[in-house]
Image (cartoon, rainbow, N blue to C red):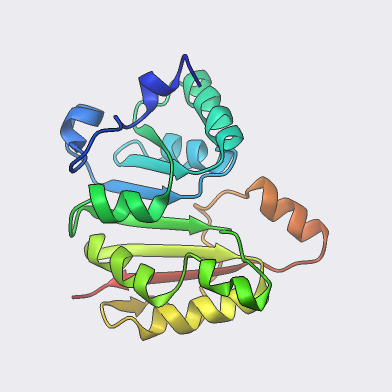
Amino acid sequence: MERLLPVYAVPDVEGPIDQAKLFGRRAPLVLEIGSGMGETTVAMAVADPDRDYLAVEVHTAGVANLLGLVEAAGVANLRVVHGDAVALVRDRLGPASLAAIHVFFPDPWPKAHHHKRRLIQPAHVRLLADRLEVGGVLHCATDAHHYAEQMLEVLTAEPALDNVHNGFAPRPAHRPDTRYEQRGRTAGRQSYDLVFRRTS
């Protein structure tokens, strides 16, 4: 963290992120919310060099592992934020600034009295949709069935977004397996993908 965070992190200053200064270019920007241990994020950034990736993760162990992977792979189009995703989106990313947002296997907060902590809820989805450019994609995935149903309901209710598929999406080939997803599959849990596009 001490050695690599200053190299790959978004500077912790007030105001909008300067993408051109951060990446040294202007390219479509993908926000990865909850990058976990980082394997999937690095794999997607390496396979997609024409776009820039911004990974936000609150857990220190995940950020540290991600930083090590970024250095080992020599990834030039990935930067890291250690902190809260909603605050980042609200305070540092402007309207229509993102080509895509990935929310892969967020904490399902399974207990009913914790549902208000879930990331995919109407106010947050409205904010995420505002940060997408027209034509931009919000791609979510979960293996918690009840959360998947809630995600589908909430995303469908957001007027700025249209479902690319009829209900849940087929699993896109470009989304690598996460370690969490592999454990879930071993335990017999099915994964659900949702792909919505900003239309207005």
Residue at (28% x, 56% y) in the render: 90
Closer to the camera in the image, 57 or 136:
57
Pick out the residue farthest to the right.
Answer: 187
Residue occupying the point 50% across, 43% down: 58
Q: Is residue 164 left or right of residue 41?
A: left
- 122 relative to 2 in the view: left or right: left
25 vs 54, left or right, is: left
Quadrant for residue 145, please give it: bottom right
Q: How far across and how far down the image is residue 153, in percent?
A: 47, 84
Q: Split into 4 quadrants, where in the image is the C terminus?
A: bottom left
**Occupied quadrant, residue 112:** bottom right
Q: Nearer the viewer, residue 164 or 179?
A: 179
- Residue 141 is situated, as x and y percent measured from the top left of the image, at 55, 64
Q: Position of residue 96 (x, y in %)?
A: 18, 59
Seen in the picture, residue 60 relative to 108 is either above or below; the reply is above
Q: Is residue 118 above or below residue 16?
A: below
Residue lying farthest to the top in this orientation: 3
The residue shown at (20%, 37%) is 19
Residue shown at 48% from the left, 20% from the top: 71
Most extreme residue toward the front is: 113
Count of residue discs: 0
Residue 115: x %, y % from top left: 57, 73
